[in-house]
Amino acid sequence: MAKKLGMKARKFAKKNLPAVHKRRRKLKSTFKKRNSKGNDRLVTEDPEGNKELPSNGRLFEDDNLEETSLDAIFSEHDSEEIQDDSGSDGYLSQDSCCTNISENNFKGYEEGSIVGNASSMQIREIHLELAKKKKKLEKLKEKDPDFSQFLESYNETRKASKNEEAQYSDEDVTSDDGMQLADEDISNLIKGKLLTRSVISSLCQLVREQHSVSAFTSLLNGYRYACHYGSDSTDVDDLDSSWRIEDAETLCKILSFVLYEADKIFRELLGVSCSNCRKEAILELKNSSKWKSLKPLVKTYLRSTLFLVTQFTDSKILAFAISRIRTSVVFFAPFPTLLRRLVKIVIHLWATGERDLSSNSILILQDVASVFSSDYFDTCLIKTYKAFIAHCKFAEPSLFEHLQFLRNSFVELCSQDVHKSSTTAIASIRHLAKILQLGLRTKNEEAVKRICSWQYMNCVDLWVTFISVNVNDYDLQPLLYMVIQIINGVALLFPGPRYLPMRIKCVQWLNQLSNSSGIFIPVASFVLEILEYSIGKDGGKPGKNLNFSSVVQLPKHWLKSRNFQDLCVFSALELLSAHFAKWSSHISFPELATITLIRLRKFDEITDSERFRRVVKRFIDQVEQNIEYVRKKRDEVAFSPNDQQSADSFLQPEKFSGSTQFMQYYRNVMENASSRNLGIKEKTSFPVERKSKKRREPIL
């Protein structure tokens, strides 16, 4: 009769045996499901199906500002784990003498992409923990011989169950006769598993000329090894150590041939045309004998290529690999886990890569959103938006162009399905409004700091661009009014002269929305306040140059400089010119410009700067001339003010042609503004400052 285990042995078994861990995971998942069902009752939904906060009588929690982070509204998408697909993509059997890899090797490769992302420090800690447990186990074996016998019997039982499962496993790719090499010459060709240039050339020739599936299988085995060649990831542990590559030229030949030809070969073998990019075309073949025999090949190619793009750092190679993956996007349909992994990898490359790599990455996202629209459009949209938020915290001059590209490419992705994008836009804009309302109501330092940041400003800029592009084709009026309210709130929250760049950006957004939507948005009051910042004597020092595209808040010492006065006056005139240019042909332009002219004349009387008087006087003259022109044309019409249709068509030919005198003045103002910005030889971004080598002279 077997003796009872000692207390220490029972404790060790309870903590470390796999059966115990399995039972714990099962119970943990059960409790999670129960808790999630209970928590769902606390969440209310509006009639449109949008989740709202629990109704506790208060809109915001002042003491919990962490919940107001810009991507908190989409935090539930972070809980999605990339689990592995069923099916393996280990080495494909080529002949009867090839040794099949074990189940542990398959499992190691399947989990490799997750473990491989762990840092070397984490791996070292895991090894140390395993070593401690191993020493502890050895001590228990010495103290308790019965426990040692128990472990041996347990290991034997586990091995027997594994062998029994392996006999009936449907994952073994060797069962497919189509994957076996019938040609003995090919078997002899790769004997020893040494991949040389001559071997690869022979296999490539067999694939091209004879369409040999066996030769292609051998190439995919070599391709898989080449993708993992030289990698420090733990994913390499499952590779067959007997495989070798002769030199770098052989490695490049394997990679380039498979990347170029794999998609074409798969389509020929499955009978799918290159023009057929519907996921249904692949899913219909899922139960066919062709697909069952080719599934391991397709999966090996896709997974190895995804591993390849996570290892390379050269942008050109990555751009090429991503462009080849794009041609095979439809083959990800039977592998949802690989598709999610593709989306995750591509979004990272889109946000961090150079222009060519980023362009190819967004094209894949657009294809995924198009091919798998019902399932993956929202996923692509939200994850892309979160990546944009994470990478727009800073607006250095070197990153400004890249941020513009990210914004424009995201808007293109949204424009593929404006109705679904509007749901995401509404949720995001409401969250921006919540953060703004919290700042306006509490004036909390953290809340205000969160609004006065490039991350918040870039999010507003993103949705302003989205609305401007699509407002004429879709009903986006609710979004338009919400964004206008947010912009007005930001301008009111930061009225001081130090926030001049922020106010200029707000007025530019309002002008952009007005131009695209055709709705009058008053901006003159915001612009005229900018002029008041510059009232003073014209005797300040030039000051250090700043790149205003990367500054949210101006340094205090710069407010007394001559450059600050120049920025106030010339920016105000540029913004007013853009505002009046939109409405210069409108029938109500004389009334629209009256108050602005009064304020400008008052500024002309107060200022002591002759150069400011000159440019302001010229602007006043141009506006007055346009007023006289509109009044003259208005006196000639025969319709009454109640005829809205005729009033809207007033001066339409002049409006579309842009031939009015004020439009010509506006073009000159914009050209001078561009040349003035380009004339700055050295730009610095706050708070890093350097001495200016050349004095900036304003031109208007």
Image (cartoon, helix red, strand yellow):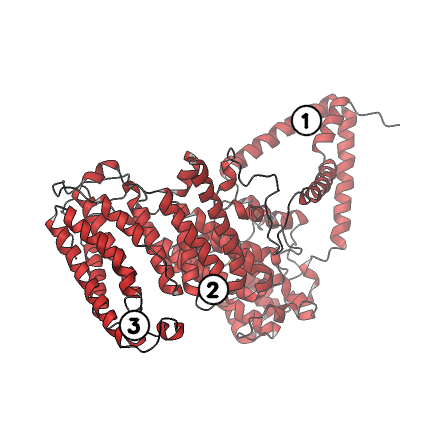
User: What amino acid is found at the position of numbered circle 3 in the picture?
Assistant: Lys
User: What amino acid is found at the position of numbered circle 2 in the picture?
Assistant: Ser
Mark 3 or mark 2, earlier in chain? 2
Residue 337: image quadrant is bottom right
Query: Marks 1 and 2, how far apart in space?
Result: 63 Å
| Residue at the disc numbered 1 | 138
Place of residue 532 in the rendered image (x, y in percent of width and height, measured from the top left): 23, 45
Place of residue 306 in the rendered image (x, y in percent of width and height, measured from the top left): 52, 56
Rendered position, 91 above or below 588: above
Q: Nearer the viewer, residue 446 or 371?
A: 446
Give the secondary structure at mark 2.
Answer: helix
Q: Nearer the viewer, residue 672 or 288?
A: 672
Dots 1 and 3: beta carbons under 8 Å?
Answer: no
Place of residue 219 in the rendered image (x, y in percent of width and height, measured from the top left): 54, 63
User: What amino acid is found at the position of numbered circle 1 in the picture?
Assistant: Glu
Res 595 visible: yes
Say how many tags the image has: 3
Q: Quadrant of the N terminus?
A: top right
| Residue at the disc numbered 3 | 655
Q: Residues within 10 Å of mark 2 (few under 14, many from 20)?
A: some
Residue at 53% x, 34% y is 124
| In this picture, residue 531 sits left or right of residue 241 | left
